[in-house]
Amino acid sequence: MKIFLSHRSRDKPLVQDFKELLPPFLNTWLDDESLLWGGSLATKIKSTIQSEIDFVVIFLDDDSLGSSWVRQELDWAIQREQELNRTFVLPILLPEVVPEQLPGQLSERLCLRLSDYGLASIEALARRASEKLFQLIVESYSCLQSEIPRRKSKSLKEIHDELRGRQVILLGYVVQQCQDGAEVTQRYIEKAMREFHASELYYRLETLIHQGFLAKRRISEDGLFSYRLTEDFQAVLSET
């Protein structure tokens, strides 16, 4: 999962400390770490929020609520949330702000709060945020699993012939990379399939596994996988 950390420049030290306390399975996006030298700030951030991440964590206080830049990031994130039709924007309230000051899009949401700027409070906030993010990830995965079509009593050849569109594009890429029993890592698939949002890509890979085309294995402690063609599907390919 990839998390965008939205904040004012003045709060960057706090956000960096918070980031370091998150578990490794949460990949974070920070502007000074992720932007390329000479790149367009607005273009890259808008593109990242709208197509490259799974959640926006936004740090709010009195000043950030009045910041045109933070409000712009929030508007992009709210727009993306409406497109996804699921929770996407996750507010964190800093000590100076009160819930009544929140904009309408956030006023009725559950918000996490930083009680003070001491290390113990930041550690507690990071633990709480990690727990909530894990719950959201499990819920998202459960929803995707419920949408994965159940495999019927058809042959792999019949199912393959019925595949359409983006599923075909993804399977075709994996087939190209995984001839003769080779594997392709999750990172390579993500880089090659940039037209897929992360959640859609994971859903489609899981669907191909469920349908019998692919198998996966964990290759790192932070949840990365590699993928290969199943023996049954390789046999189908050898016949065509």
Image (cartoon, grey):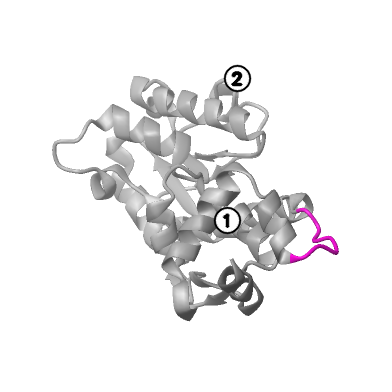
Q: Is mark 2 on a helix, strand or loop?
A: loop
Which residue is drawn at the image coordinates 71% and 65% (left, top)?
A: 156
Q: What stretch is highlighted in magenta?
A: 149-155
Instruction: Place residue 9 in its image quadrant.
Output: top left
Residue highlighted by disc 2: 104
The foreground one among 105 and 239 is 239
* Quarter of the rendering occupied by the C terminus: bottom right
Question: Where is residue 146 drawn, in percent x and y?
Answer: 78, 53
Q: Which amino acid does label 2 sit on?
A: Gly
Q: Which of 6 and 173 is in front in this view?
A: 173
Q: Is residue 183 visible?
A: no
Q: Which residue is drawn at 44% across and 32% down?
A: 61
Answer whether residue 177 is magenta in the image: no
Q: Distance between the residues labelled 2 and 1?
A: 32 Å
Front-most of residues 199 and 32: 199
**Residue 186 place in picture, x, y as percent:** 46, 64
For badge 1, the amino acid type reads Tyr
Which residue carries the number 1 mark?
Answer: 202
Horizontally, residue 80 falls left or right of residue 72, namely: right
Q: Where is residue 211 in the image (x, y as percent from the top left)?
A: 71, 63
**N-terminal-most mark, 2 or 1:** 2
